[in-house]
Every structure is written in C-alpha cells, then in structure tokens.
C-alpha cells in the first residue's frame, strides 16, 4: 500500500491521534537508506511543477498544519524547495490583523489561493479558526462549531474550480516537541525561534489534540483529503510528504501544451542554419506549404477569417 492510501484520513472516519504512532516510519529503515528515494521524489516534483505551470490548467493548494515545532518550516525547506519560485508561493497565516478580523475568517485565505498553473503552500491556514480559536475561546462555540461545514463548502468550491487540495497534519508527540524546544538552545541558528508563548501553548496540548482530531475527522474528503504524517522522524516526514505530493500531481495527468506556432516554419525563418542541417526545404517552400500541411490549423484560420468577415459586414 502506498503512503498516500495508508496515511489518508478516510472520509467519515473518527481520528484518534493517541493511537497513531508519531515515530512510525513504515518499511523504511533510516535517513541514509531512504535519501535516494527522497531525491527522486523531489526531482519528480520539479518536473511536475514545470508541466503544471506550462499547462496553465490546474492549481495545487498544500495545507500544512502542526503543533509548534511540528516541522512545517522544515518540510517547506526540504520538500517544497523542489519547486521553482516562479510558480510557487508560501503563505504563512499569523494572528489576524485588525483588518482581517473585520472580515469573515475566510477572507484572508481565499485571496491567497493559487491561480491556474500555480502552487501555494499554506503554512497554517483557515484551520487555525477551528484550532487556536477553539482552544482559547476566541469566538463562542456556536460560531466555531459551524466552521467545519463552512470550511468543507469552501474547499469544495475551490476543487470545483480546478484547484487540487492536499492537507498535511505533521504529527509529533509531546515528548518530541519538548526535545525540539530544547534543541533550539543548542543550535545558534535556531535560537531565534525560542518563544515563551510556545511553552505556554504546550500546556493546552490535550485541547489542541482534541481540536485537531475533530478537524481531521470532519474535514477529510476524497476531494480534499487530510493526511496524518508521522513526523517525529524528520526524514520520514519529508519522504511521506514528497511521495504523496508526487502521486497526487501525477494523478492530474498533466501534459505540456502543443506548440502554438508552426515549428518548421519558425525554424526555417529564424534558424535557417539549423533547418538546413535537418534537411528542411527552403523558406518560401515551407511558408507556402503551411496551410496545406497543417490541415487543422488551416481550417481554423479559414473559419476565423469567415467569422471576421461576418463581423465586419
Ligand atoms: P508561528 O506560525 O509560530 O509564526 O505563529 C503564528 C501564530 O499565529 C500561531 O500562534 C497561531 O496559532 C496564530 N494564528 C494563526 N491563525 C490564527 C487565527 N486565525 N486566530 C488566532 N491566532 C492565529
Ligand atoms: Mg510558534
């Protein structure tokens, strides 16, 4: 069974995070022996993004959620760096600004979703509005409890419009979180991340786990699946996320668009030396031959002309 099937939250199932081992690493042994596979997936992700950009038909929205120190930033660094920044953006959602709070909670989210040909990675997302908001009673229960259905409808709308959604919950356990907070003291390039509020939030661990379980159970559908990624081992997390992204993108059956120009004619007109080497006939001959050779194109052009004539008259 692929990790895509194994780690996907089945629609309608009830998630119990306490029963999911955050240290799980499937059939993979360790980082060393799986590195080549991760590299292979990352190369494939690059290729797939290039086609997505060129085809300009699909878009991909990746949602990353996790407890503090769960590895969202690391996943972006190690997996999403495979994507060309020209067709990919990462958006982090922080405590809402006064302007954001003056709107409905999906307002700031919807405007950051990807357009055709693009990939957007959400580092935190609209799910915060049923996580931190619920845990800290930032709005009454009557308000947040309606949001699961609202989120499902919103995501349905996105997918109906050609966006593919993939949602990852990076699952670490409480001990691993403390270890990662501790590690930050040892690594000078991580000390900037040390935050007292992270320790305070840790006191609400159980409430967060409950809120996550509800969100994962109520909001996973075939059109917008949640995947629970065992993430105590960073190398397995990267491997699982990249493998699932590759399979998801391959499922879109994307292909490069046909060239929009007549290749032979362009080659002959502007690269005569290349054309000569490939044995193409002289320029005039090629240009004259285009309408006959390219029956389809010729027909279209003919139709267009007729239409234009009609319009003019
Ligand atoms: P970080 O991702 O560590 O930079 O922190 C961002 C903070 O913003 C986290 O503590 C989130 O819980 C918080 N946050 C994100 N979205 C919301 C929201 N809709 N309401 C309240 N807090 C939020
Ligand atoms: Mg934080």
Image (cartoon, grey):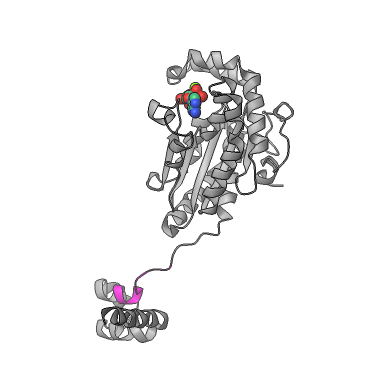
The answer to whether residue 174 is seen in the rendering is: no
Above or below residue 21? Residue 120 is below
- Where residue 190 appears, x then y in whole percent? 45, 20
Above or below residue 197? Residue 288 is below
Quarter of the image that includes the C terminus: bottom left
What residue is shown at x 38% (from left), y 79% (from top)? 300
- Where residue 117 appears, x then y in whole percent? 44, 53
Which one is nearer the viewer's eye here, 187 or 77?
A: 77
What residue is shown at x 54% (from left), y 49% (from top)? 157
- Where residue 260 appears, x then y in whole percent? 37, 69
**Quarter residue 129 falls in:** top right
Residue 264 falls inside the magenta stretch: yes
What residue is shown at x 48% (from left), y 33% (from top)? 105
The answer to whether residue 72 is seen in the rendering is: yes
Residue 127 falls inside the magenta stretch: no
In magenta, the rendered stretch is: 258-266
- Where residue 252 appears, x then y in whole percent? 55, 56
Above or below residue 295? Residue 208 is above
Please give left or right for residue 13 compared with residue 179 in the image.
right
Above or below residue 63? Residue 69 is above
What residue is shown at x 43% (from left), y 36% (from top)? 108
Please give left or right for residue 26 compared with residue 102 in the image.
right
- The number of numbered badges drawn on the structure is 0
Which one is nearer the viewer's eye here, 21 or 11?
A: 11
Taking the view exactly as shown, the residue that stands out farthest to the front is 142
């Amino acid at each position: 069974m692929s990790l895509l099937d194994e780690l996907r939250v089945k629609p309608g199932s009830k998630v119990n995070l306490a029963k999911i081992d955050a240290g799980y690493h499937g059939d993979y042994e360790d980082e060393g022996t799986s590195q080549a596979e991760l590299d292979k997936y990352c190369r494939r992700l690059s290729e797939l993004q290039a086609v997505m950009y060129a085809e300009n038909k699909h878009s991909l929205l990746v949602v990353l959620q996790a407890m503090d120190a769960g590895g969202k930033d690391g996943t972006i660094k190690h997996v999403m760096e495979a994507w060309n920044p020209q067709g990919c953006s990462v958006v982090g959602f922080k405590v809402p600004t006064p302007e954001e709070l003056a709107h409905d909670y999906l307002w700031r989210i919807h405007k950051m979703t990807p357009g055709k040909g693009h990939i957007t990675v959400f580092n935190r997302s609209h799910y915060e509005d049923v996580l931190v908001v619920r845990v800290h009673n930032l709005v009454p229960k009557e308000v947040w409890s309606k949001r699961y259905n609202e989120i499902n409808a919103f995501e349905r709308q996105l997918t109906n419009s050609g966006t593919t959604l993939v949602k990852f919950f990076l699952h670490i356990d409480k001990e691993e979180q403390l270890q990662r907070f501790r590690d930050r003291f040892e690594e000078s390039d991580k000390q900037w991340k040390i935050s007292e509020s992270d320790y305070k939030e840790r006191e609400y661990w159980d409430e967060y786990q409950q809120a996550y379980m509800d969100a994962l159970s109520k909001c996973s559908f075939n059109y917008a699946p949640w995947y629970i990624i065992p993430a105590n081992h960073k190398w397995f997390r990267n491997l699982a996320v990249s493998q699932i992204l590759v399979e998801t993108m391959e499922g879109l059956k994307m292909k490069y668009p046909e060239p929009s120009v007549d290749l032979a004619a362009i080659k002959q007109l502007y690269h005569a030396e290349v054309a000569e080497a490939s044995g193409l006939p002289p320029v005039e001959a090629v240009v004259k031959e285009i309408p006959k050779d390219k029956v389809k194109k010729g027909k279209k052009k003919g139709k267009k002309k007729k239409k234009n004539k009609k319009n003019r008259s």
